[in-house]
Image: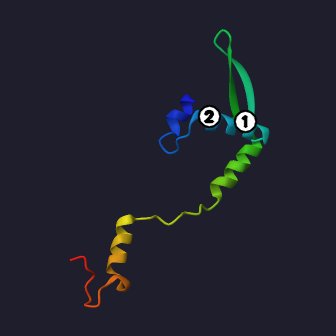
Amino acid sequence: MKYFDGTVAYVWSAPHSQIYPELRRMERDGLLDVEVVPRGERAKKRVYVITDAGRAELHSWSTELATYQPERDVYRSVLRTSSSPATRRPDGNSGNT
């Protein structure tokens, strides 16, 4: 987790409770291999390694075009609606003066 926190955490934040189930799912799907290694006197930790299938999936994912949602700019939409003909008064003013 220290490696994650020091690399992509500034772009994508996720609680540990989200990351570990996802790692196990990726292991189950054959995208990762895991090795359990000693951590200190009695503890153990899981070291994950990406598989060839995982590399292929990562490559496929990274080359997909992302669908971006239109950005909502509250200020622009206020300006647009305040100057549209539908919001103007019969005298031609928008009422914002």
Q: Nearer the viewer, residue 37 or 26?
A: 26
**Image disc number at residue 24:** 1
**Image disc number at residue 75:** none
Q: Can you name the residue that lies furthest to the left here?
A: 97
Circle 2 packing at 10 Å, graded few (<14), some (14-19), many (20+), is few
Q: Where's residue 8, x and y in %?
A: 52, 40
Evaluate if marks 1 and 2 touch, with contact meaning CB atoms under 8 Å apart: no
Q: Where's residue 18, x and y in %?
A: 62, 38
Q: Can you name the residue that lies furthest to the top here?
A: 41
Q: Where's residue 16, x and y in %?
A: 59, 33
Q: Amino acid at mark 1?
A: Arg
For label 2, the residue is 17
In front of the other: label 1 or label 2?
Answer: 2
Q: Nearer the viewer, residue 61 or 91?
A: 91
Circle 1 packing at 10 Å, graded few (<14), some (14-19), many (20+), is some
Q: How many marks?
A: 2
Label 1 sits on a secondary structure element that is helix
The residue under the point 68% across, 39% down is 22
In the image, residue 76 sits, relative to residue 37, either above or below, namely: below
Q: Nearer the viewer, residue 80 or 22?
A: 80
The residue under the point 77% across, 45% down is 53
Horizontal arrangement in the rendering, residue 36 relative to residue 10 (left or right): right
Q: Amino acid at mark 2?
A: Ser
**Residue 38 location, quadrant:** top right
What colour scheme governs how the chains and residues are painted in the rendered image of this protein?
rainbow
Viewport quadrant of the C terminus: bottom left
Horizontal arrangement in the rendering, residue 4 relative to residue 93 (left or right): right
Q: Where's residue 58, x and y in %?
A: 68, 48
Q: CA distance from mark 1 to mark 2?
A: 12 Å
The residue under the point 63% across, 12% down is 40
The residue under the point 28% across, 81% down is 94
